[in-house]
Image (cartoon, rainbow, N blue to C red):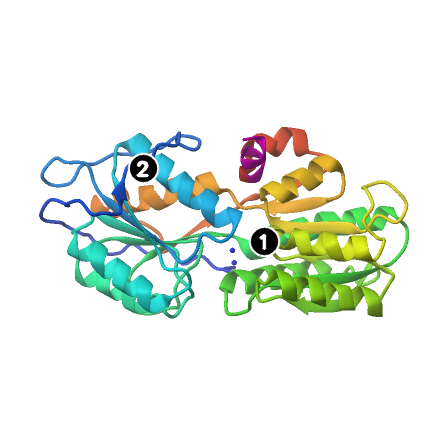
Amino acid sequence: MYPLSMTRPATFFRLFFLGACVGLTACQKSEAPAANGGSGSNAPSPNGKPLIIGVAFETLQTEYWVASFEAIKADLKQRGYPMLEAVSDGDANRQLEQVKNFITRKVDGIILVPKDAKTCLPIIKAANAASIPIVLFNRPADKSAAKSVAIVADNFALTQETVAYLMSEAKKTGRKHKAAILIGDLSDINAIGRRDGFDAALKGNEGVVEVVARIPTEWNQEKAQAGLVNALQANPDISFIFTSSDFLFPSIVSALKSAGKYHKFGTPGHVILGGFDGDATAYQMLQDGYLDATGVQDVYFEARQSIQAILNLRAGKPVPELIRDPGFVVHQGNLQQKAAQMWGAQIAKK
């Protein structure tokens, strides 16, 4: 969820592996169809058996994380690779123990969603010591000597593109708008990238939009709703809102309805509204005409790239330390064309 405005390619560590991977209580094969298909070489382990991949998520509390987890599981199933799974529920120490368990079971690769950029470093070092390739999904680690690959949405660029579209819609109204931005947890590098992308889009457009409220949410629905309610009371003429994550839309909608400001696109009183992630709520709000645009993380791209990075590392191929998901912007003008690529649309249609 996260700038990584600089990609630093690096060819690093050729890994070799011994021994077969054995089962685990949490080991299971996916039953879901593969998302957009799997790609690349499906290399077996040295003894000819399918690779076993350990997948450790910090949380499954939002649609994005669930969709990502299921996309990885589906892709692994299509390739014929069993998956060991673990969820740490926000506990970094528990996650370290879970990954150590993977290592004991001799997994062939690890996909990790860490709690943050710092607490994952001991986990990466443990994987390095065991010569097991490790890929960080959607959250990169701090710079260190530890070796990993990160598959990350280009939070800065995608937010900038999304907000630039919202700015273009604001210009069409011929008036200046007062704006609020809901900022994520700033211990999360994704939240920082999205905040900075918003500010980059704002630069040069101060005559179009004036930011009157910066609302810290710490990725918490109650904080988001209370903060926006207060902002709307202090500035009842707010007419432009951007949220750093679509999962906060229920709180935003509630606050707007309470203030009598929830109106459809193209109708009087409509608040220009944008977000980031591309979840099912955002898709429905686009369908219903209340949401102007959202920046979509390509969950299926990120899942494929995570698995392929492990295969390439095992084969001794060069892999950049940072692989970016460029994502795409879905808005009222291109929804029909882009819905098939939007993970939230697929969830909503189910």
Which residues are the magenta region? 344-350
Would you say residue 16 sits in the magenta stretch? no
Identify which residue is drawn at 43% across, 56% down.
Answer: 59
Q: CA distance from mark 2 to mark 1?
A: 29 Å
Instruction: State the residue position of label 2.
Output: 76
* Tag 1: amino acid: Ala
Residue at 9% over, 49% down: 18
**Foreground pick, 115 / 305:** 115
Query: Do callouts 2 and 1 mark residues in contact (Cβ within 8 Å)?
Result: no
For image coordinates 60% across by 54% down, the residue present is: 245
> Secondary structure of the magenta portion, mostly?
helix
Question: Magenta segment: does it hold 346?
Answer: yes
**In which quadrant is the C terminus drawn?**
top right
Residue 295 screen position, x and y as percent: 61, 47
Is disc 2 surrounded by few (<14), some (14 to 19) or many (20+) residues within 10 Å?
many
- Residue wearing tag 1: 157
One can see residue 318 in this view: no
Element at badge 1?
A: helix
Judge left or right: residue 90 versus residue 98.
right
Across and down, in percent, residue 260 comes to: 85, 53
